[in-house]
Image (spheres, helix red, strand yellow):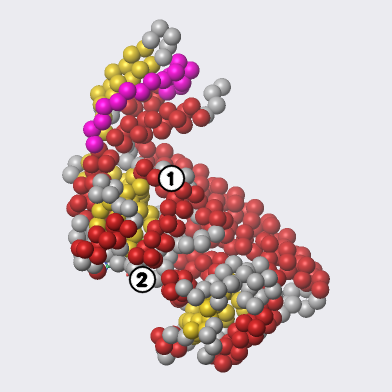
Amino acid sequence: MTSSTSSSSSHKDRVHDPSKRTAILVTYPDQFVIDEAVGLAEAADYEVLDIMTRRYLSRSKYGVGPGQAEKLKMLVEESGAEFVVFDEKLQSNQLYNLAGMVGREIIDRERLILEIFSRRASTAEAKLQVKLAELIYEMPRAKAKVRLAKVGEQPGFFGLGKYEVDVYYQAIKRQMTTVKQKLQDASRQRELYRAQRRKLDMPIVSLAGYTGVGKTTLFNRLTGESKEISSNLFTTLTTSTRSLNLDGFKILFSDTVGFISRLPTYMIEAFKSTLEELTYANLILLVVDASQPLEDLNRRYQSCIEILSELKVSPAKVFLVFNKADLLDESQLNLQMLALGATPEGSVAISAKTGLGVEDLLGKIRDTLFEPVETQISLEPSDAAHLSAQISWLKTQGEVAINKSADGRLTINVKSNSWTIERFIKSVDEAKAKPHG
Ligand SMILES: Nc1nc2c(ncn2[C@@H]2O[C@H](COP(=O)(O)OP(=O)(O)OP(=O)(O)O)[C@@H](O)[C@H]2O)c(=O)[nH]1
Ligand SMILES: [Mg+2]
């Protein structure tokens, strides 16, 4: 075994499960990254026979250096692996060169994530989202196939001739248009559903967080549902929403797709309508797995923060939940919480599995959303004219006193709960943003 390869006994000594596809994993020499890559490969039903680690996986010709590509070929031949899982994004020419060198199909990180999503997508919308992501992935590669097909016979590229490749490329373009159209329909559907939800006058609390941290376990515990839970990555791909009663205060509670590090932007884009749910939430419970080593915890937390900011979610709405507290003692837990800069007001430690701390969490959700607030809101005459529906709604939600000055400006004094006021202010902003005829 060379220094560039590491083969832990857990991968080598395992009895091969014939239903799984065997693979050599190429990844970075970093335990966090290795563990995540193995998790991803396993979630896509690959059995990792051996692991090769390199510091650089974006070298121009093969991703790895030429000498390492040779070593990979030997590793593939020795182990009899059917595939190479390459834990980095590769360009078409790199995929092509490496496949030619090792004589196996190369599954790069993006394709791996797509394979998992495609296996797990169960609703029509999730299937469309995955299809769109697959087409976006395929598009630049199809162009390269057209180019490469002109050069000659291309093993690892399905042996398509130039004509077939052209047809293939055009077909991808057409499919993409159709899928986008269908997704727009689904998005309109979702908009209608959202409008209905607004009428329910309940704040929305959404779960967010890395895949596998226990979001669905918590969702099931609180709602009495039995949605699928597993140690595999990306168990949940679609959003589920249920109403919950917190001592007389009603909320809508949502579970959604988990995050992962180095998630390509176009995948966030493809899953936008699912992830968009987060932008409509009044409160986001960002769940982390407190039992992970601090460095991993921190990296996963940072990935989540990045994705949330990409989705333009306000940090003020994020409440941090340290799950799996049953696996740590109190001092360890405190250290982990301290390290992420968690404050007692903005976080809580729980175990979704045992129920520990869950009452505390519910209390904090209730306090955050239903805290009584008194405030004053001023509206310009030009805005006030378009806001009668919103103002009527506000009047049904608390004590409201309105003063109109001579120039038509409205001053609204309102006493209600925090989420109602937040929602009113948001609807005012939305009305202002809309052009009026
Ligand atoms: N020890 C312990 N395990 C937990 C706890 N909560 C969840 N788990 C386990 O963590 C694993 C992942 O749980 P899920 O609820 O499926 O995680 P998720 O965040 O919904 O994952 P995705 O749907 O993939 O994003 C399962 O094996 C759960 O049994 C907990 O509080 N303590
Ligand atoms: Mg889940």
Determine whether the residue tagged by mark 1 lies in a helix, strand or loop.
loop
The residue located at (57%, 88%) in the rendering is 75
Magenta-span inclusion, residue 40: no
Q: Which residue is mark 2?
A: 231
User: Can residue 17 be seen?
Assistant: no
| Residue type, label 2 | Ser
Q: Which residue is mark 1?
A: 313
Q: Which residues are magenta?
A: 371-387
Q: Could you classify mark 1 by the number of other residues whose Cα lies within 10 Å: few (under 14), some (14-19), or many (20 or more)?
A: some
Q: Establish if 197 lies above or below 32.
A: above
The residue located at (53%, 75%) in the rendering is 27
Determine whether the residue tagged by mark 2 lies in a helix, strand or loop.
loop
In the displayed structure image, the side of residue 330 where residue 183 appears, left or right: right
Place residue 156 in its image quadrant.
bottom right
The residue located at (49%, 75%) in the rendering is 29
Q: Nearer the viewer, residue 339 or 216?
A: 339
The residue located at (76%, 67%) in the rendering is 146
Disc 2 beta carbon < 8 A from ligand 1? yes
Disc 1 beta carbon < 8 A from ligand 1? no
Q: Nearer the viewer, residue 7 or 188?
A: 7
Q: Establish if 297 lies above or below 273.
A: below
Say the numbered circle drawn on residue 20.
Answer: none
Q: Nearer the viewer, residue 113 or 373?
A: 373
In this view, the mark in front (1 or 2): 1
* Residue 200 percent across, percent down from the top left: 32, 38
* Residue 33 percent across, percent down from the top left: 46, 71
Q: Earlier in the sequence, mark 1 or mark 2?
A: 2
* Residue 234 percent across, percent down from the top left: 43, 65
